[in-house]
Image (cartoon, rainbow, N blue to C red):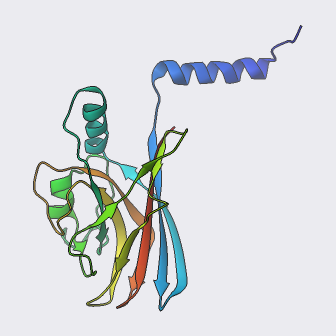
Amino acid sequence: MSQVKVQDKMTIGMIRKRILSGDIEIKGVYRLKHYRKGELIGEHESKNLVTTEGKRYLLSTGLASGTAKTTWYVGLINNDNGAKNGGVPVAPAATQTYDAFFDTINTEYTNYTNANRVTWSGVLDGSLAKITNIASKAAFTFNTASGTLYGACLSSNATKSNHAAGDYLMSFSAFSAPIAVEIDDVVNVEIELSFT
């Protein structure tokens, strides 16, 4: 007859407590590949923050018959969350909403060839509670001027610089270091979200 060790009991107890308490976390990561003249010159990875607005959207559409947004879009940020706040950086916060994020908090980077924000083609994993666009990354080609990227985000509206109420900011990531881009550079963005 096998015996359950004290350490095993502690592990089982922790797992049971986590399940009973409903301690489920939504997390993810943004991964970028930066190309210049066809050559890969940089790879960047940063954690993403899922907003309270995004979490409420998931609960509403999944459990309360809320209206679903069928397409989501990747946008870029070209300031360090401070240009619209007297130069004082605004730390990423879960309470930030779609309209405030693009209206009063950040300046969106729009100097790329797509007429709109780039579609995020997320595909649900076959067995894990995870969704990612790794098979079809959001591709940005910069066409009018050099610039600096400070972050990226996932939202439900396609229009560049739009900040109208009624749409959602699902998540965003402030890069660990600014990314300098030049004309004709290409940046591919992968966004992965998961429940743990």
Residue farthest along the right direction in this orientation: 1
Rendered location of residue 139, percent (x, y): 38, 73
In the drawing, does residue 126 fall left or right of residue 145? right
Q: How many marks?
A: 0
Rendered location of residue 171, percent (x, y): 34, 53
Rendered location of residue 146, percent (x, y): 32, 89
- Indicate the quadrant containing the N terminus: top left, top right, bottom left or bottom right: top right
In the drawing, does residue 173 fall left or right of residue 72? right
Residue farthest along the left direction in this orientation: 164
In the drawing, does residue 136 fall left or right of residue 162? right
Tell me if residue 178 can be seen.
no
Rendered location of residue 36, percent (x, y): 47, 88
In the drawing, does residue 88 fall left or right of residue 35? left
Instruction: Please tell me which residue is depicted at 58% across the width and 19% down the height of the picture.
Output: 16
In the rendered view, tell whether residue 41 sits above or below residue 2.
Answer: below
Q: Residue 177: which quarter of the image?
A: bottom left
In the rendered view, tell whether residue 134 sits above or below residue 59.
Answer: below
Q: Residue 117: which quarter of the image?
A: bottom left
Instruction: Please tell me which residue is depicted at 41% across the width and 81% down the height of the picture.
Output: 186
Q: Residue 55: which quarter of the image?
A: top left
Residue farthest along the top direction in this orientation: 1
In the rendered view, tell whether residue 54 sits above or below residue 91.
Answer: above
Tell me if residue 110 can be seen.
yes
**Front residue (pair 96, 171):** 171
